[in-house]
Every structure is written in structure tokens, then in C-alpha cells.
Amino acid sequence: MRYRVNEPAVAFHEVDREIIIIHLESGYYYNLNAAGSSVWKLLAAGHEEKAILAAADDAKTPEKSLEVSLREFINTLREEDLLTESSRDLPPDSHAPLSGWSDLPVCSKFTDMQQLLLSDPVHDVDSKGWPHIKKNPE
Amino acid sequence: MLAYYKTAENKNRLRERFISIGSLRIRLAFASLELYDAFCPALAHIQLADSIDSDLTIHVCDGSTEASPFPPPPWTEEQIQRRGDIAVPGSGLRIFYSGFIRSLSIFCAEEKSAVYWVEKAADLPAFEKAAPFRVLLHWFALTAGRMMIHGAGIGTDAGGIILTAKGGSGKSTTSLLCLKAGLGLAGDDYVMLDTETPLVYSVYATAKLEPEQVDRFFPDLKQDIAFAAANGEKAVLNLNRLFCGKILRRFPLKAIVIPRISEQEMASLEPLAPFKAVLAAAPSTLLQMPGAGAEELRRMADVIQKLPCYILNLGRNMASIPAVIRSLCAA
């Protein structure tokens, strides 16, 4: 499985080896630690998920749960709608370049800004259509 | 929309105002007296005495004229995004529709022209009067290497800080405390930032406060409430009367500061890692600005990484806050 970043709904930027992600439609934002940022960059570049998991297996880190953590991490990115499946045709991965693991990948989620999106621009429009608004929206 | 505006302008008397935000010169053409009265106070400090050649004209009208039918939108409901921005590929337009305010903002960089329409001027919420045209001004700013930032700009002509965080975190209270202690202010909620230099520019000379905060901390400012609090909104203070000499037109940005309410006695600073500062500062700006995305995030991150960043612990002794901020401005 390959993925791409769910742009333009998602904006991201790397600062100090950590990725900051803002989901502009849900109002949630995220911080990936250095290990998570490495995985994000591989996924965003189109590397296959199974190649990344295989590389994690090859890495033989003392952390037994690395592969499990990676699966959970990638699932989180999908469930949060930060990544979507991609069908782009890239050369097959032999090995995704995973190295230097010292931490498990972590995605921290922040929900305190969601109220900024509470005013919905669409669903209060009445039957007369745009730009008229329901007087007493349900 | 321009034809609709022209009809309104022909029916009502045209009122013009010219403002400058640094080198950016803007003509405001009002075909609505109510909107003229609602929006001009916030911009009075950057108003020019004479007419000028402008870099942008914003045509301002409302739906009260009923002089002509409102033009049907050339887009579908599906094209309206979550933040109200409307994607019309290939049009050269940036469009924002606010269902809450019932307003429409259209910007065309190529034509150096914009339209601001609101269905009922009388229903405008106070926050719109405190910071008029901010979406249009953000899109215009992007064409000049600048952007609108959700934050307070506090300092002196020699330098200052941007205090940024979500609403309710103490930006306005801190801003007014600093003003009363002799520091200058470029804005309490939004400023324009040149992300290259980096210079902070003032756009609005207003402050928003909960009514109980006005009573508790700033009772002497009650007479400067331009728009009273209503429907759970904050009151809007016009800062031009009491603090006209302290409204900074621009200053060099020296630091990014994130306020945090704390239980300690005196205000204090803690260094903050740049990625944490971006994490604290960027979401509130991007989520409030229709159409903002990766470009704005990159610009904010680039500026923040070049500057010292701090947590400002707002102590119980509020009088200690201005001195802490003054120390950053002088750095």
C-alpha cells in the first residue's frame, strides 16, 4: 500500500526534526516525534507500507514492539485522514531507508482549536439558497 | 459582483477612505453608510489624509439596497470549503463566504480589486467591526510577502513581540496592561507580518475584552467601548482616543511569546523550543483564515525558527507582566 498526504486539507511542516500537521477541515493538529517524522516522510514520498515495515523488521532494534507500533502509527495517520491511499506508479521499494531508531513513532493529537471551525459556512443556508441563511437553523 | 456594487454606489453616496499598511496603500470605496460607520473606527490610525494611487481597492456594499438582484453564484455548494473559502479553479479569484456573518469577500490580485458584501450591515457582530476585511487583507498581504497573524503585537518603535495563542489565553488583557504601562501596541488580535524582514504592521486599533474584564481591570476604559458586548461576544474598545500616541504603525519583530495562565506570583519567561512555538502559534492563524494552508505554515515556521521563543507565565501579580515584555523588546 502506498499513500499520499491528504492535501490541501492537510498542511504540514518540519521543524527541528519534528513534523507539525494541521488538518484544516477537522480543526485538529498533530505533532510527530522524530521517529514518526521519519516514517511520515517515507510515506509522503510514496514508499510502500510493507517496505517500511520490512525495514523495521530488518532494523533488529531491541524494541520488540517496533513493528506493532509502526502499524498502529500508520493506521492512526490513516484514521485521522492525514494520509490517503495513492495509486501513483513509483519504482518498487527494495528497502525504505530506515535507520537510527531510538524512539517509537508517536503521533500526538491536539483538539483545543476545533471551536474555530464551529461556524459552518454551508449548512445554515435556507431553501432560497445562497446567500440566504435559515433564520432558525436546527 | 462589481456590477452589483456599482448599482449600490449609484443609489447611495460613495464614501472613500485611503489607508496604508507600511508601503501597501488601499482605497476603501463604501457604497453603504452603515458599513462606513462600522469599519472606519478600527482603521482610523492608518487612514491617510489625501487620496493616493492605491495598490488595492476594496468595494464595500450591503444587501439593503435591493437595487438589483443578487448575482447567482458561479459555484456549487460542494465547492464551499470547511472554512468558507470557495474553490473556483482558473478564475483568478479568491472567495470567502461566511454563513455566520452572511458576508462575501472576493479578491482578484490581477485586477487589484476586491469586494466585501454583507447581507445586513445592522447585524454585523462586534468582532467583524473590530477587524474588518481581515481575510481580504490576508490575501492581499500574501502578494507582498506578508500575512495576517492571529496575535497581539506589543513593543516599541525599536522592536517588539508577537503574543500569540488561541482566544481566552490573555492576549488582550496583556496588551492593555502593556499599553497602560507605557508600551506600544500594533494590534491586540491581528497584525500583519512581513515574513522576510520580519516587520510587524498595525492594521486595527481595537481591543476585545469580556465585559467583566473591562469592569475588573480597566474600568477607566468603559467610555472607549466602541461596540458593546452582545450575544455572548466580547466588547470592542477603540484605542485611538486614549492611546493614539501608543499605536505602533510598525516595529521589528524580536520574539514570539505564548502566554500561559499560571499560579505563580510574578510573571516570568521560559525558553520555548521553536517546534513547540510553531505548534502553539500556527493552528489558530491557519484555522481562522479561509484558504490558508501549507504556504502560510511554512512562512510562519520560517520566521519563528529565526527568533527566540518563550512561554510567558502570567503571574497573579498582573502589574509584573509589562516589565517582562519590555525586557524582550529591548533585547
Image (spheres, rainbow, N blue to C red):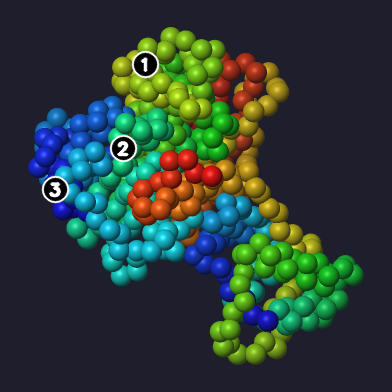
Which residue is found at the position 30% from the left and 35% from the top? Answer: B121
A56 sits left or right of B197 in the view: right
Q: Badge 1 is on which residue? A: B224
Chain identifier of the residue bearing label 3 in the image: B
For label 2, the residue is B120
In the rendered image, is residue B163 in sight?
Answer: yes
Q: Secondary structure at mark 1?
A: helix
Badge 2 amino acid: Lys
Q: Are marks 1 and 2 on the same chain?
A: yes
Chain letter of mark 1 equals B
Residue B244 picture location, percent across and down: 31, 20
Frontmost residue, A125 versus A9: A125
Residue B6 got which mark? 3
Residue neighbourhood size for the residue with mark 1, other residues' Cα within 10 Å, grouped as few (<14), some (14–19), many (≥20): some
Q: Is residue B276 left or right of residue B286?
A: right
Residue depth check, mark 3 versus mark 1: number of the one nearer the observer: 3
Q: Which residue occupies 51% across, 27% down?
A: B232
